Amino acid sequence: MIRKPISFPGSVPLTRALAAEVVQTASGFEARVMIQREQKIVNAKSMLGLLSLGTDDQNDMILVAEGADEEAAAAAVLAVLA
């Protein structure tokens, strides 16, 4: 299991377009890819889940990847969010 903090450069919010790109990227991997914010954990392959995180404060978000291709999945999703 991989756990990596997510940092949004320049306080760019998690827009619908960015969430769609994350979903498309994460869906290309077998690994389970999740994003945790405080006590809430959502599937990064779910547009509704990502948008439910809100756009007000995006600090303290953590990417969690687990599975056969977890390292590649984490790197790809983090690249989209960078």
Image (spheres, rainbow, N blue to C red):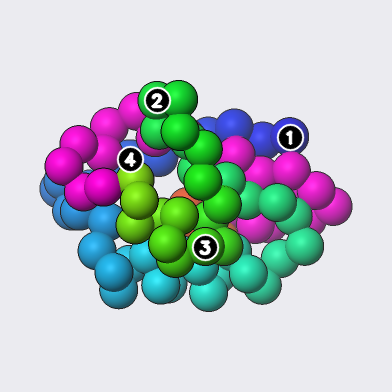
Residue position marked by numbered label 4 in the rendering? 7
Amino acid residing under circle 3 = Ser
Q: CA distance from mark 1 to mark 4?
A: 19 Å
Mark 1 or 4, nearer chain start: 1
Q: Which mark is residue 46?
A: 3
Frontmost of labels 3 and 1 is 3
Frontmost of labels 2 and 4 is 2
Residue position marked by numbered label 1 in the rendering? 1
On the picture, is 71 further left or further right than 44? right
Say which residue appears at 33% left-offset and 40% top-offset.
7
Q: Which residues, given as a range, are shown in magenta?
A: 54-75
> Dot 2 lies on which element?
loop
Say which residue appears at 20% left-offset and 36% top-offset.
57
42 within the magenta span? no
Amino acid residing under circle 2 = Glu
Frontmost of labels 1 and 2 is 2
Q: CA distance from mark 2 to mark 4?
A: 15 Å
Kindly tell me whether residue 79 is visible in this rendering: no
- Relative to the observer, which residue lies in front, 48 or 73? 48
Amino acid residing under circle 4 = Ser
Where residue 12 appears, x then y in whole percent?
18, 53
Residue position marked by numbered label 2 in the rendering? 38
On the picture, is 24 further left or further right than 29? left
- Relative to the observer, which residue lies in front, 72 or 49? 49
